[in-house]
Amino acid sequence: MTIQRLLAAQQESTEAIKDLPGQVDRGLESALEKVDTWTADAIHHTPNFVAGLLVILLLYLLGSLLSYLTRRHLARRQRENLGEVLGGLVKWVVVGIGFLLAATIVMPTLNPGDLVAGLGVGSVAFGFAFKDILQNWLAGLLILLKEPFHVNDQIRVGEFEGTVKKIENRATFIRTYDGQRVVIPNSDIYTTAIVVRTAYPLRRSEYDVGIGYGDGIDRACEVLVKAVSQVEGVQPKPPVEALPWDLAASWVTIRVRWWNESRQTDTAHIGSAVVRAIKLALDEAQIDMPFETRVQLFHDQTEDVDGDRKLQREGWPESGEGSSRPRWQAQADQ
């Protein structure tokens, strides 16, 4: 009896394990019900999805059209870079509005105000993460709007100087005079001082000339003004000037000033021609251009009159009577 009972209990437990009440059947039925629900919802909202996609497509096309019109309008005013930046901004603003409208069409219960509020909270974190990019973009937009300089202007920013080739929404591209490209972030340009070399059609240049102390200053100034005025590229108005500027150790400095075209190539070539004309004119007029002269005086600080400012001489002592003697010799004679 005991063995029969054990066998019966084992059989009952095995049957219970094999067939738990509806476990597999219920799981399969639940999964199928969910798939059916999703399929029904997808079929039910298919018109909404199609309408949302059409809205995005239409607003994308509208944004592209407005972007094209913006670029074309500003290109007629010779402001192509501003057109590219504003055109891109207009396009993506319109596309963003399209996404908001599509989201409200697909999900009618969605409140656009709540979505905008959520985007506003997320934009704070987005702003911190991409602070430098946004700062450069905004600076580039302000540069294009204010136009402190234009494309093909020659500017100096810090240690870099060259010709502006392109102004983008993030950086400004400069081609230096020796043919190198420099990419400068727009925020650096907007927050630091820049020199626009070609802001005006003319630029004043100058060069210092030294003449001998024995030469006439007025005559030298006349020779310099006449010589520089005849150089090709030097503007007649404002006229050339030659101004006595400094009484140096070895020469009298005369500063020559003239006006020429503001571009760097004109300034360099005309400046070279001016230096050549100055040299030839002063040689022809026999006006001295002295070298730097230095005089070194050697003084014996052991003279017997050392400290007596009435007798002590700076430089070489005079020969003959009355000349000072070394202190050791004066003491020996005593």
Image (cartoon, rainbow, N blue to C red):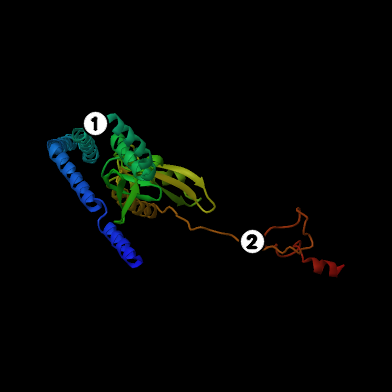
Left or right: 300 with respect to 109? right
For disc 2, the marked residue is 297
Q: Is residue 26 visible?
A: yes
How far apart in space, not on screen, are marks 1 and 2 (Cα)? 100 Å
The type of residue carrying mark 2 is Leu
Q: Nearer the viewer, residue 293 or 83?
A: 83
Q: What secondary structure is found at the residue carrying circle 2? A: loop
From the top left corner, tell me how far across and down residue 97 is, in percent.
22, 34
Left or right: 287 with respect to 112? right
Residue 58's image quarter?
Answer: top left
Q: How crowded is the residue under tag 1: few (<14 C-alpha within 10 Å), some, or many (20+)?
A: few
For disc 1, the marked residue is 109
Q: Is residue 202 above or below residue 31?
A: above
Q: What secondary structure is found at the residue carrying circle 1? A: loop
Q: Is residue 193 above or below residue 248?
A: above
Q: Nearer the viewer, residue 81 or 259?
A: 81
Q: Nearer the viewer, residue 2 or 208?
A: 2
**Quadrant the C terminus occupies:** bottom right
Residue sitting at x 23%, y 37%:
96
